[in-house]
């Protein structure tokens, strides 16, 4: 089973700031990586698939990059509505695995 | 608009059985794998298992193999997650989620149900 490690676990942020979240895979997953946003009491929402392709209706301030074992999610000009927990998810094999999440705090 | 609507919150006792549902709409149900994801309160996400409604082929995460059963009813475009004997450790919110790519068991998850909280307590 591939282990996904996200860093940092918690990040203090301010509106307008550029934020970068990291996700590392224990083995190569090529580009089979997704990012999700989860707000309290809500289901996760797909932001990025294929490491860098934004999902439908996702604002352009969200971007993903990476290949193999190192990936990142960048939020340009953070808005207060972006405060949430972000999870990466590898789907290169079954069962796919999720990172433990990065929580953004104001 | 694609929708996944899950059944409501459940409170059960250890040893009881339970079947929760995920009713889908506005896409071709039989073409996309659909799965269940567990989230223990305050914790992260973990796969329970997935099913391909076209032929009911199923995959379970090793942690859940033999502990739960995933099924579908194609006639009503609905997926199910079932326990025969619940344990306190099954307490969590369970989400159903649709695979983004048709026919592909390895995919990101583009639509999610609202979650079904399950509480198991004596």
Image: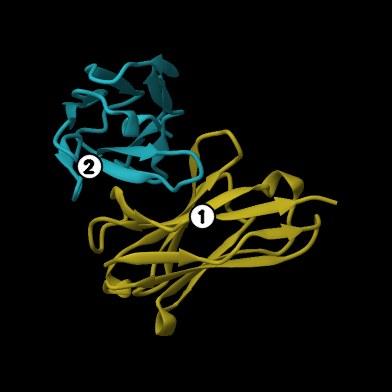
For label 1, the crowd category at 10 Å Cα-Cα, with few meaning under 14, some 14 to 19 and many 20 or more, is many
Disc 2 sits on a residue from what chain? A
Query: Is there CB contact under 8 Å for labels 2 and 1?
Result: no
Q: Is residue A49 left or right of residue B55?
A: left
Q: Which residue is mark 2?
A: A49
The residue lying furthest to the bottom in this view is B75
Secondary structure of the residue carrying numbered label 1:
loop
Nearest the eye: A89 or A40: A40
- Asked which secondary structure carries label 2, the reply is strand
Give the colour of chain B.
Answer: yellow
In the image, taking residue A80 as reference, residue A3 lies left or right, namely right
Of the 4 image quadrants, the one containing the N terminus of chain A is top left
Q: Locate residue B104, reporting x and y percent.
A: 26, 57
**Residue B56 at x, y percent in the picture:** 42, 71
Name the residue at the right extreme: B122
- Labels in figure, total: 2
Marks 2 and 1 on same chain: no
Q: Is residue B100 above or below residue B82?
A: above
Q: Chain of mark 1?
A: B
For disc 1, the marked residue is B115
Q: CA distance from mark 2 to mark 1?
A: 22 Å
Q: Is residue A6 above or below residue B36?
A: above
Residue B106 at least partly seen:
no
Q: Specify whether B30 is left or right of A52.
A: right
- Is residue B38 found left or right of A83 in the rendered image? right
């Amino acid at each position: 089973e591939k282990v996904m490690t996200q860093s940092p676990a918690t990040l203090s942020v301010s509106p307008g700031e550029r934020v970068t979240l990291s996700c590392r895979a224990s083995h190569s997953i090529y580009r089979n990586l997704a990012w999700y946003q989860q707000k309290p009491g809500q289901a996760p929402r797909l932001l990025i698939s294929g490491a860098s392709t934004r999902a439908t209706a996702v604002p352009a301030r969200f971007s993903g990059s990476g290949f193999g074992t190192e990936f990142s999610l960048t939020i340009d000009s953070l808005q207060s509505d972006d405060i949430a927990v972000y999870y990466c998810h590898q789907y290169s094999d079954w069962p796919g695995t999720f990172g433990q999440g990065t929580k953004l705090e104001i | 608009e694609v929708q996944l609507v899950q059944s409501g919150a459940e409170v059960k006792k250890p040893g009881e059985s339970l079947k929760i549902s995920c009713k889908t709409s506005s896409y071709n149900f039989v073409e996309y794998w659909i799965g269940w994801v567990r989230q223990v309160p305050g914790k992260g996400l973990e796969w329970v298992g997935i099913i391909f409604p076209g032929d009911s082929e199923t995959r379970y995460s090793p942690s859940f193999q033999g502990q739960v059963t995933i099924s579908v009813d194609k006639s009503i475009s609905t997926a199910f997650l079932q326990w025969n004997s619940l344990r306190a450790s099954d307490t969590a919110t369970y989400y159903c989620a649709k695979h983004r790519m048709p026919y592909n068991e390895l995919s990101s998850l583009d639509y999610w149900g609202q979650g079904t909280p399950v509480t198991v307590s004596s």
